[in-house]
C-alpha cells in the first residue's frame, strides 16, 4: 500500500515541551498506571478468601470484580472531556488520590456491600488513570522518542495483568486478601507526589474551555457500558440469553449504544468526540487493540484454569508457571522501543501477530501429560509477541493525531482494549464449558460393551482394583475412573479449541495491518504522511 505525502494537520506548529525531564514524568504516570492495571486482575485469585471472610458466596463475591470493571469502563471514554474541563494535572492527582483512598477502604471493608462500594470508587478513580498517563507520555516526549515512551507504558499495560494473579495469590496465601489493596497505599502516595511535582498541563489545556456537561450523553454511556459489562461478566453463569434479565440487558445496551453514538455525533460539545475515528490509523489501531485485549486477557484467564483444574497445580504454582510470560514481555519491550522509528510499524505489528498466533497454536497442542516447560515456553513467546504489537500499534494509531486530540483518543483506545479483554474472558469461560459438554457427549458414545478399547480398559482397571475392593465394588470404581478420564479429555479439547481459535483470530488481523499509513519524519522532525 503506497504512502501519501500530505502533511499532518498542525505538523508545522511548534510542539509544546514540558519544563521537566520527560523521564521524571514517565516515572510519575507509570507508577499510577501499573497500580491501576494490576488491580484489574490481582483480586481474581482472592475471591474465595474474600467470600469466606465476609460471609458471602463465591457468586456474590464476583461483584467485587464486576463493580470495578463497570465503573472503570464508564469513566474511560470520558477522560478527554474531564481533562479539558478540570485540567489534566488536577484530574490526574484527584484520580490517584481517589484510587489510593478507596484501596484503603477496600482493605478495611467489614462486609461485602462496603467492599463493592469501595471498588466502585476505586474503578472511578482508576478509569481515567491509564488514558491520562498515555496522553501525558505521548505529549511529553518528542515524536521521534514516542516509541520509547510507549514501550515504557507498554511494560505496565502488558506485564501488570500477567503478574496480578501471581502476586495476588502469594499475598493471599502468605498474609491476607486485604493486603492486595493495602499495597496500593505507598505506590499511590509516591505517584501523587511525583505527579504533583513534575506533571504539567500544556498550553491548550490551560486555555481550553470545555462545553457544558452532556448529561444525556453521560446517561447513555453509563447505561450502555454498565449493562454490557454485566452481560459479559455474568453471561455464562446465567446461561446467556436463556435468562430473561440478560435479554433485557442486551436490548437496553444496544439501544443505549446507538443512542450514544447518534448523540455524540450531533452534539456541539460531545462528551466523547467520535470524530477522531475518521482518522484511518486510529480506527485500524482501535480494531487491533480490541483483538489484542481479547487474546491477552483471554489467555491470562484460560491458562490458570487449565493448570489448576486439569493439571492439579495450586494457585501459586500456576502463577509462577505464567510469570516468565511477563518476563518475556518486559525484556522485549526495551528492544521494541528502540526498533520503533527505525523499523516500520507495519513490520513490527505483523511480526507480533504472527508470533502471537504461533504461541496460541503452540498452546493448542497441549495434553494432560505436558510438563511445566511445555506451558512456560509458549507463554514466554506470547509475552514477546504482545510486546512486538503494543508499542508500535499505539505509536502508529496515535501518529497522525494532534496533541489536543490525545486525551480523547487514548480514552477510546483503552476502553476498547478493556472491552476486548472482557469479550475474551467471556469467550473463554463459555467455550471451556460448552465445548467440554459437546466433546463429553461425543466421547461417551464409546463407553459401550461393543467398543473393544473400552472393554479392555475396563477389564484391566477392574482387575487392578479387585484385590483391594472386591469384584463388585472394583467394577464400579473402574467405571468411575474411566469416566473421570473422559471428563478430563473433554475439558482438554475445549482448552485446545480455545487456544486454536485465538491463533486463527490473530491471523485474521494481518490484513488490517496494511491499513496503517507510514509515519515519516520531515525537516525538523515533523511528521508527514
Image (cartoon, rainbow, N blue to C red):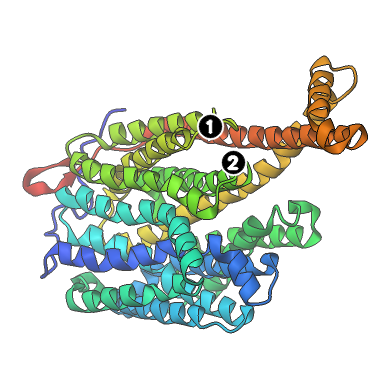
Q: Is residue 426 left or right of residue 24?
A: right
Number of dots carrying numbers: 2
Judging depth in this view, the residue of 411 and 127 nearest the camera is 127
Q: Which mark is residue 192?
A: none
Q: Callout 2: few (<14), some (14-19), or many (20+) C-alpha neighbours within 10 Å? A: some
Report which residue position mark 1 lands on.
Answer: 370
Considering every residue shown, the one lying at the far right of the view is 472
Assess whether mark 2 and mark 1 are in contact (beta carbons under 8 angstroms): yes
Q: Is residue 6 left or right of residue 170?
A: left
Asked whether the viewer can see residue 415, the reply is no
Q: Quadrant of residue 332?
A: top left
**Image quadrant in which the C terminus is located:** top left
Report which residue position mark 2 lands on.
Answer: 311
Q: Quadrant of residue 233?
A: bottom right
Name the residue at 83% across, 23% down.
459
Q: Secondary structure at mark 1?
A: loop
Residue 225 in the image, given as x and y percentages of width and height: 57, 63
Marks 1 and 2, the one that precedes in the sequence: 2
Judging depth in this view, the residue of 236 and 42 nearest the camera is 42
Judging depth in this view, the residue of 204 and 193 nearest the camera is 193
| Rendered view: 249 above or below 145 | below
Amino acid at each position: 500500500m503506497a504512502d501519501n505525502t500530505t502533511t499532518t494537520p498542525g505538523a508545522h506548529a511548534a510542539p509544546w515541551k514540558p519544563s521537566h525531564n520527560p523521564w521524571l514524568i514517565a516515572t510519575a504516570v507509570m507508577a499510577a498506571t501499573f497500580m491501576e492495571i494490576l488491580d484489574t486482575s490481582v483480586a481474581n485469585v482472592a475471591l474465595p478468601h474474600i467470600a469466606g471472610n465476609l460471609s458471602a458466596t463465591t457468586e456474590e463475591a464476583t461483584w467485587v470484580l464486576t463493580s470495578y470493571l463497570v465503573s472503570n469502563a464508564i469513566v474511560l471514554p470520558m477522560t478527554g472531556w474531564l481533562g479539558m474541563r478540570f485540567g489534566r494535572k488536577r484530574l490526574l492527582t484527584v484520580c490517584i488520590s481517589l484510587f489510593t483512598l478507596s484501596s484503603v477502604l477496600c482493605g478495611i471493608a467489614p462486609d461485602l456491600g462496603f467492599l463493592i462500594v469501595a471498588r466502585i470508587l476505586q474503578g472511578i478513580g482508576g478509569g481515567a488513570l491509564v488514558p491520562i498517563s498515555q496522553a501525558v507520555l505521548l505529549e511529553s516526549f518528542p515524536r521521534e522518542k514516542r516509541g520509547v515512551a510507549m514501550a515504557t507504558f507498554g511494560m505496565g499495560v502488558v506485564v501488570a495483568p500477567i503478574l496480578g494473579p501471581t502476586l495476588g495469590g502469594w499475598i493471599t496465601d502468605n498474609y491476607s486478601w486485604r493486603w492486595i489493596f493495602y499495597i496500593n497505599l505507598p505506590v499511590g502516595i509516591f505517584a501523587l507526589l511525583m505527579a504533583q511535582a513534575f506533571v504539567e498541563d500544556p498550553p491548550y489545556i490551560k486555555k481550553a474551555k470545555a462545553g457544558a456537561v452532556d448529561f444525556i450523553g453521560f446517561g447513555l454511556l453509563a447505561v450502555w457500558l454498565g449493562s454490557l459489562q454485566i452481560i459479559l461478566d455474568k453471561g455464562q453463569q446465567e446461561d446467556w440469553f436463556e435468562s430473561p434479565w440478560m435479554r433485557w440487558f442486551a436490548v437496553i445496551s444496544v439501544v443505549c449504544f446507538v443512542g450514544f453514538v447518534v448523540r455524540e455525533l450531533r452534539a456541539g460539545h460531545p462528551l466523547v468526540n467520535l470524530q477522531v475515528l475518521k482518522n484511518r490509523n486510529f480506527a485500524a489501531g482501535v480494531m487491533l487493540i480490541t483483538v489484542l485485549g481479547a487474546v491477552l486477557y483471554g489467555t491470562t484467564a484460560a491458562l490458570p484454569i487449565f493448570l489448576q483444574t486439569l493439571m492439579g497445580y495450586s494457585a501459586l504454582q500456576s502463577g509462577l508457571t505464567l510469570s516468565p510470560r511477563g518476563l518475556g514481555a518486559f525484556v522485549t519491550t526495551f528492544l521494541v522501543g528502540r526498533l520503533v522509528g527505525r523499523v516500520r510499524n507495519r513490520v513490527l505489528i505483523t511480526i507480533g501477530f504472527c508470533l502471537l498466533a504461533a504461541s496460541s497454536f503452540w498452546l493448542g497442542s497441549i495434553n494432560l501429560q505436558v510438563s511445566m516447560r511445555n506451558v512456560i515456553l509458549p507463554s514466554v513467546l506470547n509475552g514477546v509477541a504482545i510486546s512486538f504489537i503494543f508499542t508500535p500499534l499505539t505509536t502508529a494509531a496515535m501518529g497522525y493525531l494532534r496533541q489536543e486530540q490525545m486525551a480523547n483518543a487514548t480514552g477510546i483506545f483503552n476502553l476498547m482494549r478493556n472491552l476486548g479483554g472482557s469479550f475474551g474472558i467471556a469467550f473463554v469461560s463459555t467455550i471451556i464449558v460448552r465445548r467440554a459438554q459437546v466433546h463429553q457427549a461425543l466421547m461417551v458414545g464409546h463407553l459401550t460393551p461393543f467398543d473393544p478399547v473400552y472393554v479392555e480398559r475396563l477389564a484391566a482397571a477392574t482387575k487392578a482394583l479387585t484385590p483391594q475392593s472386591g469384584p463388585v465394588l472394583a467394577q464400579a470404581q473402574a467405571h468411575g475412573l474411566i469416566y473421570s478420564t473422559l471428563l478430563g479429555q473433554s475439558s482438554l479439547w475445549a482448552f485446545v479449541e480455545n487456544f486454536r481459535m485465538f491463533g486463527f483470530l490473530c491471523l485474521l488481523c494481518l490484513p488490517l495491518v496494511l491499513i496503517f499509513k507510514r509515519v515519516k519524519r520531515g525537516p525538523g522532525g515533523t511528521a508527514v504522511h
